[in-house]
Image (cartoon, rainbow, N blue to C red):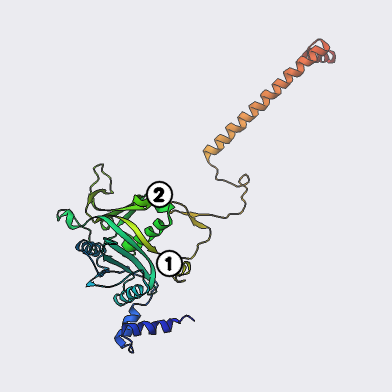
Amino acid sequence: MAPTSQQSKQIKAKQISGGKAPKARVQRYLKSTESQLVEGAKSTLLLKGIRCSQAMATVLKDLRAMQAPHTKLLSKKNEIAPFDTEGQHSLEFLSTKNDCSLFAMASHNKKRPNNLVLGRTFDRQILDMMEIGILRYKSLADYGGAVPKKRIGSKPLMLFAGDLWHHDGTCTKLQNFLIDFYRGDPVDKLVASGLDHIMVFTAADGPNDKPMFHQRTYFCKLKKNPSGGKAPVPYLVNCGPDMDFQVRRTQFASPDLWKASLKQPTAVQRKKAKNQSTNLFGETVGRLHLEYQNVEKSQGRKSKALRIAAKEEAAEEKAAVEAELEREKEAMGKEFKQTYGFEEDETERRRHGRKK
């Protein structure tokens, strides 16, 4: 039988307090880390494996610079195998202790050189993990101090180029993870100056029939539009970090756990508005239901221009009727003359002469 929410809280409190009865300070901390209706930015825990090269340590430092201030870097090396059960328990413990829902562990060995394990947790347990092998890396320091860096707390513009992001299941899940990993604080509105860097992820076919991913980061300089428009023109400058990597191992969430992680509280869910929908471009489209209206009988406003137009229309109609009558009269006169040998007008004159 699954433990209740109260029992889960007690278990977490004992884990943090080392198996002892939790103190008031621990209780206050647990209350501050409980789930909220509106969550803030996710924090990232950066840690090293049992063997970590200087190059992979640089990768962790650059990740800290990219995700600051919502990140925490541990300097001590950890003997953790992320894809083992014991290693996952260790990661869950460290994530709970440091209040981080994202983690990245760097390691380097002969079997898996330049290895980086990225993952996230849900309800204090591992949700999914991806192990990537870095084939090429260019750090922030390689670009020098002349290139401007992103501001602390700014949000990136993210572009995913390539058909593999939509056609391959692993690439689709990796895209979802990267958006969650780099998105920063959730906001409703943005100013143009807050978008100071762009991250481009390109998916292409690589060696060994595995997709290759290319990450490029650009600093966005906003300059005055030379054409005279109000909106500034962005100019992109390479600023790093840049990397080329391949996915080595994955561990995705089970369908039930994934469904539970996507569930939203009822208080936060948007109420569905009647007769409103959103199209492909994000525009709100409404539908109006009206009673039947007889437009022909509706009384409109009479103006002088409409009266003149009505008179002209009536005169044209009358002239057309008179012209049609004249044509019929001529046809009947011709038929009468062919039958009797004289026109109908002569018969009328003769009648009038006899009367006189």
Question: Counting residues from the N terminus, which is met first, the one under dot 2 or under dot 1?
Answer: 2
Residue located beneath label 2 in the image? 163
Q: Quadrant of residue 243?
A: bottom left
Q: Position of residue 87 (x, y in %)?
A: 33, 73
Q: Is residue 356 visible?
A: no
Q: Residue at x 38, y 71 (%)?
A: 126
Q: Nearer the viewer, residue 29 or 233?
A: 29
Residue lying farthest top? Answer: 341
Q: Nearer the viewer, residue 17 or 107?
A: 107
Q: Residue at x 74, y 18 (%)?
A: 331
Helix, strand or loop at disc 2? loop
Residue lying farthest bottom? Answer: 21
Q: Amino acid at mark 1?
A: Ala
Position of 146 relative to 90 (above/below): above
Q: Quadrant of the C terminus?
A: top right
Please tell me how many numbered marks the rendered image carries. Answer: 2
Residue located beneath label 1 in the image? 253
Q: Amino acid at mark 2?
A: Asp
Q: Residue at x 34, y 66 (%)?
A: 119
The residue carrying pointer 1 sits among few (fewer than 14), some (14 to 19) or many (20 or more) residues within 10 Å by Cα, namely some
Position of 271 relative to 162 (above/below): below
Q: Position of residue 104 (x, y in %)?
A: 29, 66
Helix, strand or loop at disc 1? loop
Q: Position of residue 100 (x, y in %)?
A: 31, 72
Left or right: residue 355 versus residue 196 is right
Left or right: residue 175 versus residue 141 is right
Q: CA distance from mark 2 to mark 1?
A: 24 Å
Q: Position of residue 300 (x, y in %)?
A: 57, 45
